[in-house]
Image: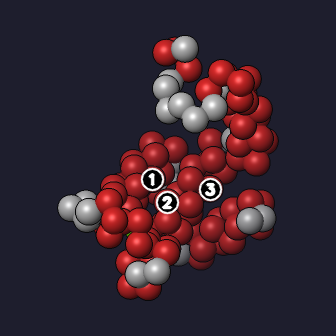
Amino acid sequence: MDTKCLQAMLQEFADVRDWDKFHNPKNLAIALAVEVGEVLELFQWLSEADAADVRINEQLKARVSEELADVAIYLLRLADKSGVDLDAAIAEKILSNGKKYPVDRVFGSAKKYTEY
Ligand SMILES: [Mg+2]
């Protein structure tokens, strides 16, 4: 994923529709949460087995794909409008999580870092 290219495409998409005026960090954060809710809605009430079948259930997979794209779009847009370098932020967070969750202490465990 080329973050900067996608953000430029989204900026153009908003500009030509005069929607940029709506894309402030508050509105984008709310839109992001709404789209995450739409992802959750797809899995709501499914059994664990049916949810795990998303890879082979083409209809569900298509709907999940569409909603994940919506989530990613608002995430990219929110990062852009907040002045956050998303690539750098993600890389830094992965490094930070690696320190917080050292392999030798957390291997195979789902405990939170405050629990060990
Ligand atoms: Mg959606």
Disc 1 to disc 3, C-alpha distance:
10 Å
Please state, as top left, top right, bottom left or bottom right, where the N terminus lies in the image: bottom right
Seen from the viewer's position, the closer of residues 100 and 92 is: 100
CA neighbours of label 1 inside 10 A, class few (<14), some (14 to 19), many (20+): many
CA neighbours of label 2 inside 10 A, class few (<14), some (14 to 19), many (20+): many
Is 108 placed above or below 77 here?
above
The kind of residue on which mark 2 rests is: Val
Badges 2 and 1: C-beta atoms under 8 Å apart?
yes
Seen from the viewer's position, the closer of residues 77 and 116 is: 116
Please state, as top left, top right, bottom left or bottom right, where the C terminus lies in the image: top right
Residue at 52% across, 44% down: 25
Q: Position of residue 55 (x, y in %)?
A: 49, 75
Q: Which mark is residue 76?
A: 3
Name the colouring of the figure: secondary structure
Is 100 placed above or below 43 here?
above
The kind of residue on which mark 3 rests is: Leu
Q: Position of residue 94 (x, y in %)?
A: 72, 37
Disc 2 to disc 1, C-alpha distance:
6 Å
Q: Which mark is residue 71?
A: 2
First in sequence: mark 1 vs mark 3 = 1
Seen from the viewer's position, the closer of residues 115 and 13 is: 115
Ligand 1 lies under 8 Å from the Cβ of mark 2: yes
Answer whether residue 23 is visible to the viewer in this image: yes
Is 81 placed above or below 20 here?
above
Residue at 25% across, 65% down: 46
Say whether residue 71 is left or right of residue 84: left
The kind of residue on which mark 1 rests is: Leu
Q: Dot 1 corresponds to which residue? A: 32
Say whether residue 63 is left or right of residue 9: left
Residue at 32% across, 69% down: 50
Is 101 placed above or below 45 here?
above
